[in-house]
Amino acid sequence: MVRARSIVAVLASAWVAAACSNLRVAHDYDLDADFRDLRSYAWIEPEAMGSDELTYRRAVGHVEAELAAKGFERLDAERADEADFRVAVHFDTEQRVRVTDWGYGYDWRLSARYGRPFGGYGATRVDVVEYDEGVLFVDVVEPSTGHLIWRGVARRPVDERATPAERDARVAEAVARILEPFPPGGAGPPGGAGG
């Protein structure tokens, strides 16, 4: 019995660790775009903040910090026409369903019902969990054409119990992972992390 409890505790700890590291990030970009001369950017103002204005504002702040660390200069709205590229951030939530089929095995509930020391073999268990997933997009647009030339996307389950500081840390991690390979091919401003 003690061994079974310790196994359950180890599995629970592993599940919690997996839940903390379940950030998924993807990137895509235009292979014909030239990223070598990008030095400055301006924001594309959103038509809507998405489902969570606080997360949107956190993301904007972290995008600005990451781009500054790479050596890119942010131009204000009055100089936006001079920018080499434009940036947009979109955040929303999507409802997801996770189905886990545990397959054949021992059903420990049977041991309690029938007083047997072991469960019944051959019983199956399927867990269905509905959850909200936060999706953060960072888009880079070529100003003269308005064409999307680079996109990074981060996805992770929403943790409604997270504190504001924890939410900020989660957004910071997502933005850092999104912008890590930007610009592609190591291009970027002289003196920046990409150059």
Image: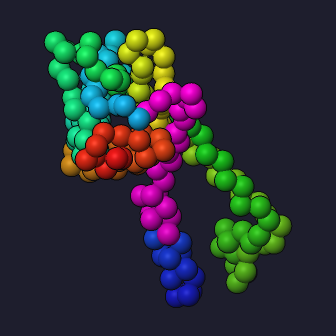
Occupied quadrant, residue 83:
top left
Whether residue 43 is visible: no
Q: What stretch of residues is rendered in magenta? A: 14-35
Depth check: 120 or 3 in front?
Answer: 3
Q: Give percent across and percent down for residue 155.
A: 48, 41
Residue name at image x 77 percent, y 61 percent: 103
Q: Give percent across and percent down for residue 117.
A: 70, 84
Depth check: 19 or 151 in front?
Answer: 151
Q: Give percent across and percent down for residue 84.
A: 33, 23
Residue name at image x 42 percent, y 27 percent: 139
Whether residue 15 is visible: yes
23 up-or-down from 116: above or below: above
Q: In this view, does 186 lie to the left or right of 119?
A: left
Q: Give percent across and percent down for residue 129.
A: 57, 46
Instruction: Check if residue 19 falls in the magenta segment.
Output: yes
Q: Looking at this view, name the residue that lies furthest to the right.
A: 122
Q: Give the quarter of the figure containing the N terminus.
A: bottom right
Q: In this view, does 178 lie to the left or right of 65?
A: right
Instruction: Check if residue 25 falls in the magenta segment.
Output: yes
Colouring of the image = rainbow
Occupied quadrant, residue 142:
top left
Occupied quadrant, residue 145:
top left
